[in-house]
Amino acid sequence: MLKDFSLELAQLQEVLSSEESDYYIPEGGKSSILEGLYMVVQVKTAFAGQGNTKLTVALQSDSVATFNSAALTTVVATAAIDEADLTANTIVAVVPVTGKLLEFIRAYFTVTAGPMTAGTVNVFLTRLPELRA
């Protein structure tokens, strides 16, 4: 979904365990519109877990919409973000998209030492991360 200069991969998505984003971008690697982008991870509702829980967000790309081919790759990823840093209404990561994008693009959330018991995020691709605070 193209919205306000960004491509949304997750919008108010509750992330309690490792899972894929609610949305994916079809035919992403075929478009020059995806050059010079940043992946932005914005916490909307604070996360809660077991005290040492961490969240990693990866931008993945594949040649098929099911994201289960041998071509599936992680293009970029955040560092593991501590639960204590996943506070409401904060941008916790802005990562330049530097890898090669294939036809389909999604975000993938990895929760370690979890599960989480609360927390929602927005994840989007944009050329202008400073416009989405």
Image (cartoon, helix red, strand yellow):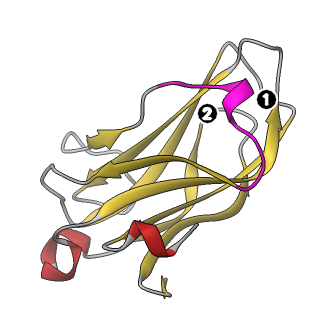
Above or below, comparing residue 131 to residue 81 in the picture: below
Q: Position of residue 122 (x, y in %)?
A: 62, 60
Residue type at the position of mark 1: Met
In the rendered view of the protein, which quadrant contains the C terminus?
Answer: bottom right
Point 46% across, 57% down: residue: 40
What residue would you read off at disc 2?
18
Closer to the camera in the image, 12 or 126:
126
What residue would you read off at disc 1?
116
Q: Is residue 119 left or right of residue 73?
A: right
Dividing the picture into quadrants, the one containing residue 18 is: top right
Residue type at the position of mark 2: Ser
Point 81% across, 43% down: residue: 46
Q: Residues within 10 Å of mark 2 (few under 14, many from 20)?
A: some
Above or below, comparing residue 103 to residue 44 in the picture: below
The magenta stretch spans residue 81: yes
Q: Which residues fall within the magenta stretch?
A: 80-89
Q: Position of residue 77 (x, y in %)?
A: 36, 38
Q: Residues within 10 Å of mark 1 (few under 14, many from 20)?
A: many
Above or below, comparing residue 114 to residue 94 in the picture: above
**Residue 68: which numbered mark, if any?**
none
Q: Position of residue 32 (x, y in %)?
A: 13, 80
The reply to whether callout 2 and callout 1 are in contact (CB within 8 Å) is: no
Give the structural element (helix, strand or loop) at label 2.
Answer: loop
Sequence-earlier tag: 2 or 1: 2
